[in-house]
Amino acid sequence: MENKLPFTKKNYQLMIIGLAILISGFIIMSLDTEPFGFGFLGITLGPVVVMAGFIFEIYAILYSPKK
């Protein structure tokens, strides 16, 4: 019987990893001690990590294992 679900177990594992990357990016932004979050963590590092998380999520959705 062929699998009818659109995602495999590997897709869901990759999506969870992407979600963890996104959450860590938002946590990094919240750790900034500068006023209004205008320090390195709030303006540079945090958004880069969040963007990497979104890119990883797109990869997790588009990933299809070799058959």
Image: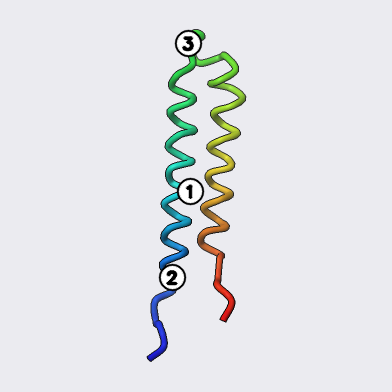
Looking at the picture, which amino acid does disc 1 mark?
Gly
How many residues crowd mark 1 within 10 Å: few (<14), some (14–19), many (20+)? many
Quadrant in which the C terminus is drawn: bottom right
What is the quadrant of residue 4 in the picture? bottom left
How many residues crowd mark 2 within 10 Å: few (<14), some (14–19), many (20+)? some
Circles 2 and 3: CB atoms closer than 8 Å: no
> In the picture shown, does residue 27 fall above or below 35?
below
Q: Earlier in the sequence, mark 1 or mark 2?
A: 2
Q: Secondary structure at mark 1?
A: helix
Q: CA distance from mark 2 to mark 3?
A: 41 Å
- Residue under label 3, please give it: 33
Instruction: Identify the disc placed on residue 8.
Output: 2
Name the residue: 49% across, 8% down: 35
Circles 1 and 2: CB atoms closer than 8 Å: no
Q: Which numbered disc, 2 or 3, marks the residue closer to the eye?
A: 2
Q: Secondary structure at mark 3?
A: loop
Looking at the picture, which amino acid does disc 2 mark?
Thr
Where residue 63 appears, as percent x and y from the top left, is 56, 65
> In the picture shown, does residue 7 fall above or below 51?
below
- Residue under label 1, please give it: 18
Instruction: Identify the disc placed on residue 2.
Output: none
Where residue 58 appears, as percent x and y from the top left, is 55, 56
Image mark count? 3
Quadrant in which the N terminus is drawn: bottom left
Q: Secondary structure at mark 2?
A: loop
Q: CA distance from mark 1 to mark 3?
A: 26 Å
Q: CA distance from mark 1 to mark 2?
A: 16 Å
How many residues crowd mark 3 within 10 Å: few (<14), some (14–19), many (20+)? few
Looking at the picture, which amino acid does disc 3 mark?
Thr
